[in-house]
Image: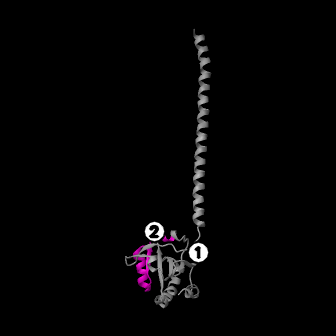
Amino acid sequence: MHSKHGRKRRVRQPSLAKSRNNWFYVNIVVAIMLILVGVAILFWMGQQSSQQQVSSVRAPLPQQGQPAPNFSLMSLSGEPVSLSDYSGQVVLVNMWATWCPPCKAEMPTIHEYYQTHRNDGFVVLAVNSQEKAANVNSFIQATGFTFPVLLDDQATVMDQYNVLGLPTSFIIGRDGTIQHTHTGQITEDQLEQYIDPLL
């Protein structure tokens, strides 16, 4: 009796072990497949993200002859101002920030040119990028600049114009098209070169 039971146990034991081994290998294969699928999805998402970044980095600034994209922002005085409000005038859209040394260095030059030519149909729209109104107001009060200062607190205009660095200036003709695009600090000679013929 005991020997028969012993034989039955010895016959069933290997088959049970074999079954467990099969499930073990199946689980390993499934786990590997899930990992591979996960890696593939992450790789695909990374590719999509990098493509979007490359496309945004490569987006060019608006160029000469293109219509200037219209925008509306709040001024420091709390009034809405649109680029289209100055249709028929020569407009210098200057994108800047108080933390930007070249921006602050060029502003007296821009302001002096503005004071000289404001009665000739010339206006400056100083578009501040992503700073608090109180900080911008303190800077403008301290410097005494009188051209309109607009608050681009969400960087919507910077994105609209594909601006990647400050300062960047756009000179817009009386017909509403961009006549010049200038990245970096602008000089008096460049202002005269770009704007005098348009006045």
Residues 1 and 117: in front is 117
- From what the image shows, is residue 3 above or below residue 41? above
Of badges 1 and 2, the one in the foreground is 1
As helix, strand or loop, the secondary structure at mark 2 comes to: loop
Where residue 24 appears, x then y in whole percent? 59, 32
- Residue at 62% across / 25% down in the picture? 18
Graded by Cα atoms within 10 Å as few (under 14), some (14 to 19) or many (20 or more), the crowding at tag 2 reads few
123 left or right, relative to 21: left
- From what the image shows, is residue 42 above or below residue 152? above
Tell me, yes or no, if residue 183 can be seen here: no
Q: Which residue is mark 1?
A: 63
Residue lying farthest to the left in this orientation: 78
125 left or right, relative to 56: left
- From what the image shows, is residue 120 above or below residue 58? below
| Kind of residue at badge 2 | Gln
- Residue at 51% across / 71% down in the picture? 158
- Residue at 58% across / 74% down in the picture? 63
Residues 97 and 122: in front is 122
Where residue 66 appears, x then y in whole percent? 56, 74
For residue 51, what is the image quadrant?
bottom right
For residue 169, what is the image quadrant?
bottom right
| Kind of residue at badge 1 | Gln
As helix, strand or loop, the secondary structure at mark 1 comes to: loop
- In the rendered image, residue 148 lying in the magenta stretch gets the answer yes
Q: Which residues are magenta?
A: 132-158
- In the rendered image, residue 91 lying in the magenta stretch gets the answer no
- From what the image shows, is residue 42 above or below residue 78? above
Residues 54 and 88: in front is 88
Q: Which residue is mark 2?
A: 154
N-term mark: 1 or 2:
1
